[in-house]
Image (cartoon, grey):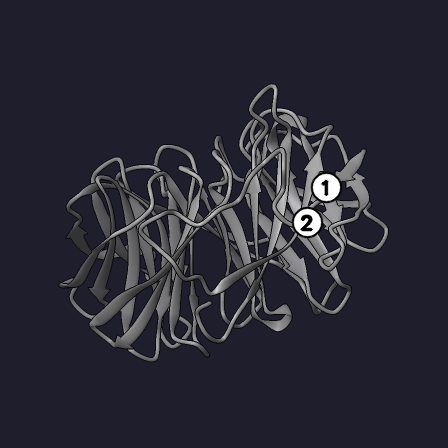
Amino acid sequence: MRAGFLFCAALLVFPIRLPHEHKQTVLKLVKAVKLEDIQGSVQHMAADVKGQRIFLAATGNNTIEIFDPQTLEHLNTIGGLSQPQDLAFLPESGNLLVSNAADGSLRTYDARTLKLLDSKQMGGDADHIRMVPDGKSVIVGWGVGALAIVDLQTGQRADIQLRSHPESFEVDSHGNRIFVNLPGTGEVSVVDRRSHTITESWAIRPRENAPMALDEPNRRVFVVSRRPARLLVLNMDDGAVMASLSTVADADDIFYDRRRKRVYVVGGEGSLAVYQQKGADEYVALSRTDTLDGARTGLFVPEWNRLYVVARNRPPFPAVLLSFEILEDAQ
């Protein structure tokens, strides 16, 4: 892959600027690199913190692209995938899990040698991946509406039927619940991962609820709906909407920064929205930073104090990978 750095702090070809209505930011652009050879869509990313690597699902290329997190230099490629969607790096084993939408597989790669170790059939449209807190199992969303819980040691699998395709979901690390965004039915389903049943369903308005994140200490669930674009803060116990704020359009990733008590929303409209949590149910729009059109997925790595965003290629403009340093105070 050719990876040519965008030169000049102002990025002459791809300008990154603050919107007029926001005069401060807590995100400082560190690097931006053109990904000349990536075609079509890009999906999610994962980090190998100890090994200093970023993995990117280049869906349109059917590859996983690997980058240095500091320089954004391209390091390597894993080829032969089938519309890769989501990634999970397992620090203990050094393996990389990749879900593939086209053939419905969950593939396991040795992240050191990049060799394929295993491929399990999940079902069509294999999508988001989340680890069970004990690290022994993985949960994969797939099909028109299902979650597969897979034991990583035995390969044993249990399926949970849902009412529509799971766009995103999060696992309660202190209990047995899985919170699942179902935009097809406009709800969040609460699933018991031991009984494999839906215990509750919370209607979401506005609809097209896509990304999700958890604030477990405050027992809050963050959900972003796209039409219109709203950040919703739900009570983890009963689904009550505790706060609702305007946010960026076409969001596909959201992250909760527990140390700074911030929420980061990545929007495909070409901007990042940051909110400061004043209390469990009080949030202030802290800053909004322009990125690029189509930059709807990201990766927050607190160990590196970085937020990464990737924009798909939009001819004649190539795909671009951006790295932001997270500042303690707004500038």
Residue 65 shows which numbered tag? 1
| Residue, disc 2 | 55
Instruction: Determine the residue positioned at 25% across, 68% down.
Output: 283
Who's the residue at 46% across and 74% down the image?
A: 329
> Label 2 crowding class (10 Å Cα cut-off): few <14, some 14-19, many 20+?
many
Residue type beneath disc 2? Phe
Is residue 107 among what the camera can see? no
- In the image shown, does 208 or 39 lie closer to the viewer? 39
Residue type indicated by callout 1: Glu
Q: In this view, does 196 lie above or below 310?
A: below
Q: Count neighbours of disc 1 (C-alpha within 10 A) and say few if under 14, some if 14 to 19, many if 20 or more.
A: many
Disc count in the image?
A: 2
Residue extending farthest to the right is 113
Q: What secondary structure is found at the residue carrying circle 1? A: strand
Label 1, label 2: how far apart the Cα atoms are: 6 Å
User: On the picture, is 198 further left or further right than 323?
Assistant: left
Percent across and percent down for residue 284 are 26, 67
Residue 104, image x and y in percent?
Answer: 55, 33
Residue closest to the eye, 67 or 30: 30
* Marks 1 and 2 close (CB-CB < 8 Å): yes
Which residue is pictured at 69% across the width and 46% down the height? 8
Which of the numbered marks, if any, corresponds to residue 245?
none
For the N terminus, the quadrant is: top right
